[in-house]
Image: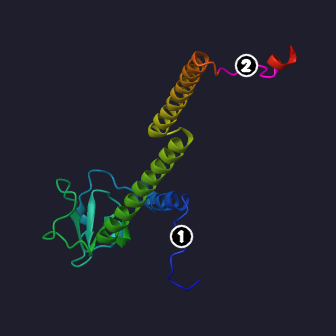
């Protein structure tokens, strides 16, 4: 197979592994939090690791500033710090990459859930006959019954006509000749 060519869908067990790996990377950050009284501005011009010990802090790589994370906004505004140089949680992942990664993981999870739902619905539908199939089977059976009724009705009408004109088929047509 040529390099760079997709080899099919990602196995379902790989998706949770990526999320678990990201979670394991962020656990040490949560464990090494500073007390809530410490302000982020005290860690300006220090290292990123010291700044991010407090979860409410945001490290801006361009000016080496430790800032309070703007909790009123989901994303920090560009006037505060560009997303490509902002760090939150871990120092080695910029905010832009973190957003892209989380979007891809979330999209993959939603796609996986949608695929599972579609597969389950298709299996459920294939087990039970479709409503239109049931209707067609019922109509076929009704037509067969009506045809049998018409056939019996025609037979009795033909027998009456034969009897009327003396053409009725007897059980043993040669019985007339035996008596002579």
Q: Mark 2 touching mark 1, by CB under 8 A?
A: no
Disc 1 crowd rating (10 Å Cα; few below 14, some 14-19, many 20+) is few
| Residue 81 in the figure: left or right of residue 103 | left
- Nearest to the observer: residue 172 or residue 146: 172
Q: Which residue is mark 2?
A: 170
What quarter of the picture does the C terminus occupy? top right
Residue 121, given in percent of the width and then of the height, sits at 48, 45
- Main structural element of the magenta stretch: helix, strand or loop? loop
Query: Is residue 172 shown in magenta?
Result: yes
* Residue 122, numbered label: none
Residue 165, given in percent of the width and then of the height, sits at 58, 19
Tag 2 secondary structure = loop
Residue 103, given in percent of the width and then of the height, sits at 34, 62
* Residue 8, numbered label: 1
In the rendered structure, which segment of residues is drawn in magenta? 168-174
| Residue 29 in the figure: left or right of residue 72 | right
Q: Measure the alpha-carbon separation of dots 2 and 1.
A: 76 Å
């Amino acid at each position: 197979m040529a390099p760079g060519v997709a080899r099919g869908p990602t196995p379902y067990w790989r998706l949770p592994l990526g999320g678990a790996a990201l979670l394991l990377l962020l656990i040490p950050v949560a464990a090494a939090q500073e007390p809530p009284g410490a302000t982020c501005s005290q860690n300006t011009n220090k290292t990123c690791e010291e700044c991010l010990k407090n979860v409410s802090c945001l490290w801006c790589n361009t000016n080496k500033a430790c800032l309070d994370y703007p909790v009123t906004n989901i994303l920090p505004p560009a006037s505060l710090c560009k997303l490509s140089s902002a760090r939150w949680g871990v120092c080695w992942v910029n905010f832009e990459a973190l957003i892209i990664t989380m979007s891809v993981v979330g999209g993959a999870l939603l796609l996986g859930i949608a695929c599972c739902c579609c597969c389950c619905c298709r299996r459920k539908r294939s087990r039970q006959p479709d409503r239109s199939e049931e209707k067609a089977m019922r109509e076929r059976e009704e037509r067969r019954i009506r045809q049998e009724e018409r056939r019996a009705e025609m037979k009795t009408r033909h027998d009456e006509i034969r009897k009327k004109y003396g053409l009725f088929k007897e059980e043993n047509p040669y019985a007339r000749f035996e008596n002579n």
